[in-house]
Amino acid sequence: MVSSNCAVSGVRAIFLEGELVPVASESMRRAVPADLPALGRMLATSLHASWNADAIAAEFKIEWSIVEVLVHDAEQEEIRGLLVYWHVADELQLLYVATDPHHLRKGIGRKLMQHLCLRAKRLHATCITLEVRADNDAALQLYRGIGFVEVGRRRGYYQTEGIDAVLMEWRTT
């Protein structure tokens, strides 16, 4: 368990590699239908976006689905990141995480995942589960760095390329 890494949710600082690091005017909030055009633009410019605004709109209709955005500057509300996850029973299942392509390599993915860890604890979930392409080295490194462990594989899950899906889990206790 890496609980010290999971300490961000609308606050002005986070713990990053053991140090308190300020977060410049960023906060997490629930996404709303008015965000769909901006999310659509963000996803359309992403290299590996498998989701679009219609897919996110569909999640708004699912009772157990939670869609959150990381916004910069409370007045402008520039969306820099997206989390889509399900809260089912005592688990969170991460469906999608995305960073605005114009803001890559700035720690946004880590902030999103740290927020999700904190949400899991606040919702009294026992774990977070996710699946990731076996060839997505950056995501695998991020998830492992936060404390996710591999719990299985779906061989050849991404059929067009024959890439495995790596199943991962992070436990709150």
Image (cartoon, helix red, strand yellow):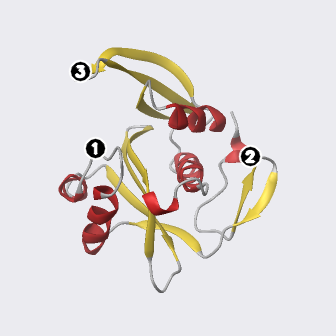
Q: Comparing marks 3 and 2, which lies closer to the viewer?
A: 3
**Residue lying at 22% horizontally and 23% vertically, measured from the top left:** 160
Marks 3 and 2 sit apart, C-alpha to C-alpha, by: 38 Å
Mark carried by residue 159: 3
Return the disc, 3 or 2, that comes first in the chain's sequence: 2
Say whether residue 97 is left or right of residue 105. left
Q: Quadrant of residue 108?
A: bottom right
Q: Quadrant of residue 13?
A: bottom right
Q: Quadrant of residue 91?
A: top left
Q: Nearer the viewer, residue 118 or 161?
A: 161
Q: Is residue 94 above or below residue 39?
A: above
**Residue lying at 26% horizontally and 62% vertically, measured from the top left:** 40
Q: Which residue is mark 1?
A: 50
Q: Residues within 10 Å of mark 1 (few under 14, many from 20)?
A: few
Q: Comparing marks 2 and 1, which lies closer to the viewer?
A: 1
Judged from the image, the secondary structure of the residue bearing numbered disc 1 is loop
Amino acid type, label 2:
Ser
- Whether residue 126 is visible: no
Quadrant (top left, top right, bottom left, bottom right) of the N terminus? top right
Q: Which residue is mark 2?
A: 4
How many numbered tags mark residues here?
A: 3
